Amino acid sequence: MERFRLAVWGIGLSAALLTVGCKTARELEAPQYDRPLPPGQYALRKITDPAMIPDITLACYDTTDLRKAIDHSLSYLSKPSSKRYYPMGEITHEMAISSVRAMAELLDGGMTGRNLQKAILDRFDFYQSVGCDDRGTVLFTGYYTPIFEGSLKPDSRFRYPLYKQPDDLVKGPNGEVLGQKLPNGSIVQYPSRREIEQTGMLRGQEIAWLADPFEVYIAHVQGSAIVRLPDGKQVTLGYAANNGHEYNSVAQEMIRDGLVPASGMSLKAMIDYFKAHPNQIEKYVYRNPRYVFFRLDEGNPRGSLNEPVTPLRTIATDKSIYPRACLAFLKTVLPRPTGSRIVKAPYTGFALDQDTGGAIRAAGRCDVYMGIGEQAGEMAGQVYEEGQLYYLFLKQPSPSGTPSPAIPLTTPKR
């Protein structure tokens, strides 16, 4: 959640399968999921043809934890600071609040199944993401919160630090990283991962210590971690900031160098490789100059809205183009535990847009929070699927008091 979110397993592990090191025509023509929107275009387009509204039937029968996630969005939207990010296109702050609250009221009324489906279709407009290709194609990936053995003090076992946000890191009014403030008052680009670690410039600002340097890197990429201390107590480390450098995928670098085949790339494959070749860790993690700083949190991990994230109900998107905290609907393929196995199957479900990540950029990307711990990590590492992303907003009355006709948020390209 690189806080701009807990960072994603937007490490692009699986993304590398199509974008790096492969030679087939299909892969050379792979979609550019991070393609920026053309100037003046928004990420969402109101659906005007009822036939284009997705089938929400199954999602209306499974609303597990949805109400809890809605409360977190309402908490965020109640803060005066949330107003600065609206309007986004025609989506106002009032529309965001009323729409999320309306869904809460439907759930509080005990609605489920076909009754909930009918109420949603009657009361809400659907907006579809234009995706990476202006036809709605969105790449879904997954992220999670790892649990690591660690300590709040260094010793012979726990030697690899995670750092709190340094005092010389300067942010802008919207939380964007401006750089490093020097003693003379000037601001320069903050040092890269390599420089931070090799110079020891943050010594004394450690927040926790881990036993494995690659676990430190995983915490950076996921943007949060739960640390199990020697006495059994657990502490949550949440995202505080990053150094402002662009994210670069270590997985892609490993595939490019032939260390792991594209067909076998996964988080587990990376962990196994670096356990067998610990002398290679620095070489590869330094190729990602982005560095993440942490803070001690209470309770469950939080997303970029500083609200708790909920498995399957929290998504991370590019907050410069998608409306924060709003009600969304996913249509894709996701892995789910079935007995002792994890099985991938078509998935539809409601979620709240509560997070963002260093590798989640543009309208063609969406990261799904898969939960905490090893199984969640295994599932997150398997998520690399195209699908569609929708947002739901209450139908707005016209000046005459009747619902206004549906108007595209943007003009479709011909």
Image (spheres, rainbow, N blue to C red):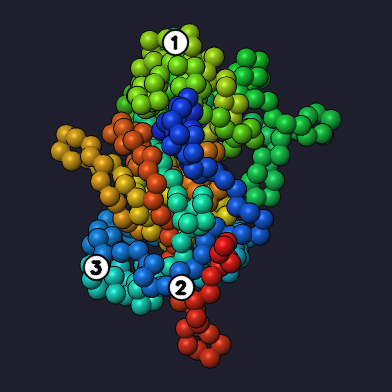
For this rendering, which residue is in front, 296 or 173?
Answer: 173
Res 112 label = 3
Task: Name the image quarter holding the C terminus.
Answer: bottom right
Please say whether residue 265 is visible from this viewpoint. Answer: yes
Question: Which badge, 2 or 1, comes first in the chain's sequence?
Answer: 2
Check the image and report above or below for 186 versus 257: below
Mark-to-mark CA distance, 3 and 1: 52 Å
At horizontal 63% and vertical 54% (from top left) the residue drawn is 38
**Residue type at mark 3?**
Thr
At horizontal 43% and vertical 68% (from top left) the residue drawn is 126
Residue under label 1, please give it. Answer: 278
Mark-to-mark CA distance, 2 and 1: 55 Å
**Residue type at mark 2?**
Thr
Q: Secondary structure at mark 2?
A: loop
Q: Please state the horizontal and vertical placement of residue 236, each as a whole percent of the image.
A: 42, 35
**Residue type at mark 1?**
Pro
Q: Secondary structure at mark 3?
A: loop
Q: Please state the horizontal and vertical placement of residue 55, each as a whole percent of the image.
A: 31, 64
Res 48 label = 2
At horizontal 54% and vertical 38% (from top left) the residue drawn is 358
